[in-house]
C-alpha cells in the first residue's frame, strides 16, 4: 500500500498535503485558543472589587472530550507523518541508481552505465531514481526543492534518497549545508526528460564503459583478483553473489553485504571479514582508493550477479548479463568482460 501511494507521483503531493494539514490544524487550534482567551478575559473580568468567583465543579465528560479529541488528531498527524517518512526514506526495489559524489564545491554524478555529469543530472520521467551519495570532504546536502527532497551527504558514509519525477522540466539542485567559501555556488540542475528523449541522451555519452567496467579494471589493477578467484578456492572469498547477501563475520555476527559494508571492508577489513577467511590477509586500501574508484569497484562486485545454485560451477544462463564474467570458463584475469573492454580500448 505504501508503494502504491508513493508511485502516483513523487513524494511532493503527499508532502505538500501533509504540510498544509499541519498548518491548518495548528493554525486553527492556535487561533481558537487566542480568540477564546481574549473573549473570556473580557467576559469574565472582575466588575466589583468584592466580587468572588463561583465554584466550578469538575465536568468529567467535557474534560475527556477536550483531552480525547486533540489527542486523536495529534496521533493521526504522527501516523501520517511516519508513513510519509517511510515513503521518503525507502526507495522502491526497482529504482535506478545514480551515484553522487559531493566535494567543495561541485556535484559529481555518475550513472550505472558510466556516464558522468557535473552539476547536472539527467533522469527519465516516471522512473524511481535512487541516489547513493558520499562526500569527499565536508558535509554537504543534496536538495531539490521542487521534489521536496533533501539529504545530507557525509564524508566516509553512504547516504541515500530517492525521487520520481512526474513532469518533464528543469529543476534547481542546491547544496543545503554550509560547506565553505563557495557553498552558494554549489548548485546545478536536474533535467527530467521523457523516456524517449532520455534514451537518446543516454546514447550520446556511453563510450566510457559502464561503471562496472571501470570497476573491473580497478579490480585487476589493484590485484584483487589474486585472492578473490571466481573458480576454485582462493585466499579470499569468491565475490560472486556477495552483493546483497547476508554474510557471517569472523566474530559470529552477520550483516548484509551492501554498499556501506563493501566500502568499509575494502578500506579497513579488520573485523569485517567473512567467517572462514582471515582479515590479516586482506590489505587495507585506505588512502589508495578515492570515493569514485570505490563506487566503481562496488558496482563491479554488484554486477557479478547472484550466486549460482549449489553444485553448479558454471552457470550458462548468466550470459544475459553482459557485465557478468563467464565463471570458471576462463582464468579470472582473462574473463570475457575484461577482454571485451580491452578490445574496446584497442579499437579507439
Ligand atoms: Cu556543499 Cu554547501
Image (cartoon, grey):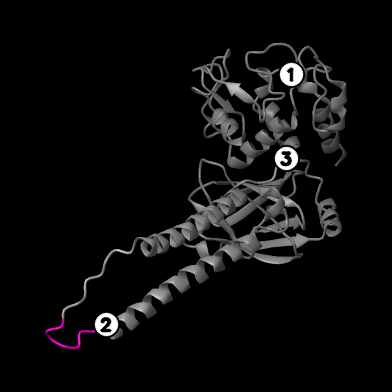
Which residues make up the magenta segment?
44-51
Q: What residue is shown with label 2? A: 44
**In front: mark 2 or mark 3?**
2
Compared to 164, does 232 lie above or below? above
Of tags 1 and 2, which is closer to the observer? 2
Residue 65 belongs to magenta span:
no
Of 250 and 3, the residue lying toward us: 3
Q: CA distance from mark 2 to mark 3?
A: 75 Å
Measuring 38% from the left and 80% from the top, which residue is drawn there? 35
- In front here: 204 or 173? 173
Mark 1, Cα crowd under 10 Å, few <14 / some 14-19 / many 20+, is: many
Q: Name the residue beneath numbered marker 1.
A: 230
Q: Position of residue 180 (x, y in %)?
A: 46, 59
Label 2 or label 3, whichever comes before in sequence order: 2
Quadrant of residue 62 within the rendered picture: bottom left
Q: Is residue 217 visible to us here?
A: no
Q: How many angstroms separate mark 1 from mark 3 (CA)? A: 20 Å
Q: What residue sits 50% from the left and 45% below the top?
A: 155
Q: Is residue 127 left or right of residue 61?
A: right
Residue identifier under label 3: 211
Q: Of all residues shown, which one is farthest toward the bottom?
A: 47
Amino acid at each position: 500500500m505504501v508503494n502504491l501511494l508513493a508511485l502516483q507521483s513523487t513524494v511532493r503531493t503527499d508532502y505538500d498535503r501533509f504540510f498544509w494539514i499541519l498548518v491548518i490544524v495548528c493554525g486553527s487550534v492556535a487561533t481558537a485558543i487566542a480568540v477564546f482567551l481574549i473573549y473570556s478575559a473580557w467576559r469574565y473580568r472582575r466588575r466589583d472589587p468584592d466580587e468572588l468567583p463561583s465554584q466550578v465543579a469538575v465536568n468529567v465528560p467535557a474534560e475527556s472530550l477536550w483531552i480525547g479529541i486533540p489527542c486523536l488528531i495529534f496521533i493521526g498527524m504522527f501516523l501520517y507523518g511516519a508513513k510519509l517518512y517511510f515513503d521518503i526514506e525507502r526507495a522502491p526495489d526497482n529504482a535506478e541508481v545514480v551515484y553522487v559524489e559531493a566535494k567543495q564545491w561541485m556535484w559529481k554524478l555518475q550513472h550505472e552505465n558510466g556516464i558522468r555529469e557535473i552539476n547536472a543530472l539527467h533522469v527519465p520521467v516516471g522512473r524511481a531514481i535512487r541516489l547513493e551519495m558520499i562526500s569527499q570532504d565536508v558535509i554537504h546536502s543534496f536538495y531539490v526543492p521542487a521534489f521536496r527532497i533533501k539529504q545530507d551527504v557525509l564524508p566516509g558514509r553512504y547516504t541515500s534518497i530517492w525521487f520520481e519525477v512526474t513532469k518533464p522540466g528543469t529543476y534547481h539542485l542546491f547544496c543545503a549545508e554550509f560547506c565553505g567559501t563557495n557553498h552558494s555556488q554549489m548548485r546545478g540542475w536536474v533535467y527530467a526528460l521523457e523516456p524517449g528523449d532520455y534514451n537518446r541522451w543516454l546514447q550520446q555519452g556511453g563510450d566510457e564503459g559502464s561503471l562496472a567496467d571501470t570497476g573491473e579494471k580497478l579490480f585487476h589493477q589493484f590485484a584483487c583478483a589474486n585472492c578473490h578467484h571466481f573458480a576454485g578456492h582462493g585466499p579470499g572469498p569468491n565475490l560472486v553473489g556477495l552483493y546483497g547477501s547476508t554474510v557471517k563475520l569472523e566474530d559470529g555476527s552477520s550483516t548484509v553485504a551492501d554498499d556501506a559494508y563493501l566500502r568499509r571492508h575494502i578500506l579497513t577489513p579488520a573485523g569485517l571479514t567473512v567467517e572462514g577467511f582471515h582479515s590479516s590477509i586482506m590489505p587495507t586500501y585506505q588512502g589508495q582508493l578515492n570515493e569514485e574508484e570505490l563506487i566503481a569497484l562496488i558496482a563491479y562486485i554488484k554486477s557479478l550477479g547472484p550466486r549460482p545454485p549449489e553444485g553448479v560451477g558454471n552457470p550458462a544462463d548468466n550470459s544475459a548479463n553482459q557485465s557478468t564474467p563467464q565463471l570458471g570458463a576462463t582464468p579470472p584475469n582473462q574473463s570475457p568482460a575484461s577482454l571485451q573492454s580491452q578490445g574496446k580500448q584497442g579499437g579507439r
